[in-house]
Amino acid sequence: MPPRVRFAPSPTGYLHVGGARTALFNWLYARRHGGAFILRIEDTDVERSSTDMVTAIFNSMKWLGLDWDEGPDVGGPHGPYFQTERLDKYRAAGFALVASGHAYRCFCKPEDLKAERSAAEAAGRTWNYDRRCQRRSAAEVAAKVAAGEPSAIRFLVPPGITAFDDLVHGRIEFDNANIEDFVVIRSDDYPTYHLSVVVDDVDMQVSDVVRGDDHISNTPKQVLLYHAMHAAVPRFAHVPLIMGPDKKRLSKRHGATSVGEYEAQGYLPEAMVNFLALLGWSPGGDQEIFSREELIQRFDLEGISGGNAVFNPEKLDWFNQQHIMRMSAAEILGRLRSAGLMNVGLEIGELQIEKVIDLLKPRSKKLADFVPQMRPFLSDDLVFDEAAVKKHLSDPAVPGLRKALASALRTVEPWTAAALEETLRAVAAAHGVKAGVLIHATRVAVTGQGNSPGLFEVLELVGRDRVIRRLELC
Ligand code: GLU
């Protein structure tokens, strides 16, 4: 049977890189094996969830190219895919657990239990719910329900050991003695995460649960629920957490953490996908650059490592640059345009712009890096770097040299980098200065900047008229 996997974000924040990596692993696994990738929105924490975040999560997933086969917008046979639209199912499941003796009504007030827990913990004792409501007689419970007393539903944890075979971590066992009778339906009738996630995973026929390591401690409770519901337990793969370069859990302190921020900074989704795929997963071998198709062909859960993965922003930049290098200039131009980054414009032909992009590719880590570098080719309104002007244009000999070069360039044929280089070197020699002096001065005069790709390629693409005009402007 092809796998059925899901990504189940809570819309309480933007799509975090950790969540995106979880979504990607699920998506790759589904695509690799011809399975289904389900998107389910876990919005039962109504206070903290928002529709803006739902939209932001959808947008980030679309940007990464993680399309879902079942879920919001596309529908599917097991919908609805928002948990707040499935509350009846959780309540029915809660009552069914009570009916089958796997759970009981608890009339204790949450604030009283909280106070008991705090007092015990302050005294250095651990505190577990003592099952006082489980000992109530059926008649007592019925009377309280009839009187309209609010109650939660608690799962009755049986004695024994709960174990599961994790695809990443191997066999994991928990002694049920350490698992408290946990609430599955709160007194406000909302389900807790454990119940809703299991009801949905059963209903949606999820075969493999691939999610963050932080859910390992939740898994025994969920396994107990599967058993109580007589449902098949899925396979679990708990993916190691993502750490910052300081080996602490990735957080705002380390810089951008949401996928949307990386999109806004001009990263390519291809690079982000490649980078995220290798955070905690390895196909073996030395290859690092993978297209989406290659990742699909290579991905498997066996390649996920148990150790924590380190998010290194410099490595992401490197991936981005590598993907930029592999992309055609026409493609990059299209991306720049759709990102709204192409709003400076002299009339230069499309082919010419593509040549400029090819020239700038090796010097551009992000899409946004192209923009200032393209300026001298696309605009006469240069931005001058003061330090470069001071360093390379202030010598009293420079204006004469600029004029001499301008006049020599009028007749250079053909207007190619090689011919331009020959001419510039000849002018420098005729004036008894080192070629470097004139090269630097010309670069600043023509681009405004102290750094650029090879000067002669730049001059070729800026074009004869503009180069001469900029050299003469002194
Ligand atoms: N909504 C949960 C979360 O965002 C999903 C956990 C799970 O995958 O089971 O952490």
Image (tube, rainbow, N blue to C red):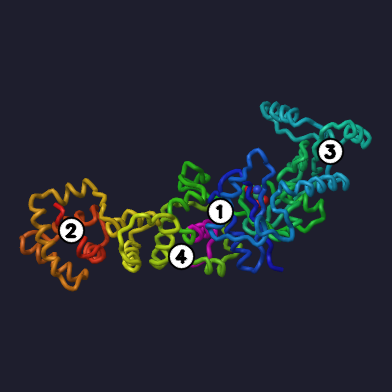
Q: Which residues are magenta?
A: 272-286
Residue 197 image position (x, y, % from top left): 71, 50
Q: Which mark is residue 469?
A: 2
Q: Is residue 306 magenta?
A: no
Apparent side of residue 315 relative to residue 15 in the rendered image (left or right): left
Residue beneath the point at 61% across and 51% down: 212
Residue beneath the point at 59% across and 53% down: 58
Query: Which marked residue is nearer to the observer: mark 2 or mark 4?
Result: 2
> Quick one: label 3 or label 2, which is nearer the N terminus?
3
Residue 97 image position (x, y, % from top left): 84, 47
Q: Between 226 and 247, which is closer to the camera in this rendering?
A: 226
Q: Which mark is residue 289?
A: 4
The residue beneath circle 1 is 59
Q: Is mark 4 within 8 Å of ligand 1?
A: no
- Mark 2: which secondary structure? helix
The residue beneath circle 3 is 105
Residue 250 image position (x, y, % from top left): 51, 46
- Name the kind of residue labelled 4 in the image: Ile
Q: Main secondary structure of the magenta part?
A: loop
> Quick one: label 1 or label 3, which is nearer the N terminus?
1
